[in-house]
Amino acid sequence: MLFDVLGQWCEGMRVLDLFAGTGALAFEALSRGATHAVLVDSGREAQALCEQNAEALGFKEQAEIFRANAFVAIDRLRKKGEKFALIFADPPYALEAGAKLAEALGDGALLTPGARVCIEHDRREEVPEAAGQLRRIDQRQLGDTVISIYAGAA
C-alpha cells in the first residue's frame, strides 16, 4: 500500500528505516532505485535479520544496519549531519510513538528539501497534522493500521 502511494519516487535517494524489523521497507526502496539505506532497530534479532536480508537481496553495500533505540539513532544521525529524502517509522503500536517521532523529525535536521516521512501507527493513536517543518499530506488506513505521510519543507 505504501509504495502504491509513493510510487517510483525512490530513485537516487537516501532512506532511513526506523524500527526496521526485517528491513522490508528499506529494501523495497533500494529495489526501486534508492542509493543508500540506514536501518535502525533496537532488537538483536531484527539487526541479524536485516543483515541476512541485505546479503540475500544483494544490498549489503547499500545498507547500513545498526542496533539502537530510534530516538537515540535520530540524535546520532543528526549530529553526523546525515540527510534523508525518505524516512520510514513503524514503531510497535504499544509505544504510541507516532506523535513523538513526528516531533523529533519535524526539526528538519535529517530531511533533504521536500523529504517524505511515513509513520505507521494504530488508528486509535492521534498524530499531528503538522510538526515543525513536517506537514501531513496523506493518510491511509487499512484495518487498525494507519500510515501518515508527511512532507518536509521544499
Image (cartoon, rainbow, N blue to C red):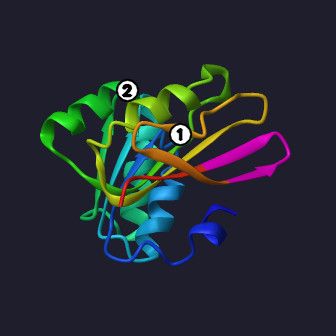
Callout 2 environment at 10 Å: few (<14), some (14 to 19), or many (20+)?
A: some
Q: Main secondary structure of the magenta part?
A: strand
Q: Position of residue 82 (x, y in %)?
A: 20, 48
The magenta segment: 139-148
The front one of 41 and 114 is 114
Q: Residue at x 38, y 40 (%)?
A: 40
Write down the residue under mark 2. 71
Residue at image position (32%, 43%) is 108
Counting the numbered discs, the total is 2
Residue 147 sits inside the magenta stretch: yes
- Quarter of the image holding residue 47? top left
Disc 1 designates what residue?
A: 130
Amino acid marked by disc 1 = Ala
Residue 115, placed above or below residue 78? below
Assign the N terminus to one quadrant of the image: bottom right
Residue 55 seen in this snapshot:
yes
Q: Quadrant of the C terminus?
A: bottom left
User: Based on the displayed image, in which of its 4 quarters is residue 13 positioned?
Assistant: bottom left
Position in image of residue 41 (x %, y %): 42, 35
Residue furthest toward the right? 143
Residue kind at label 2, given as amino acid type: Phe
Say what secondary structure mark 2 lies in.
helix
* Percent position of residue 122, x then y: 73, 34
- Residue 2 magenta-drawn? no
Vertical placement of residue 80 versus 3, above or below? above
Q: Which mark is residue 108?
A: none
Check if mark 2's residue and mark 1's residue have beta carbons within 8 Å: no
- Label 1 environment density (alpha carbons within 10 Å; few <14, some 14–19, many ≥20): some
Q: In the displayed structure, does residue 2 sit left or right of residue 89?
A: right
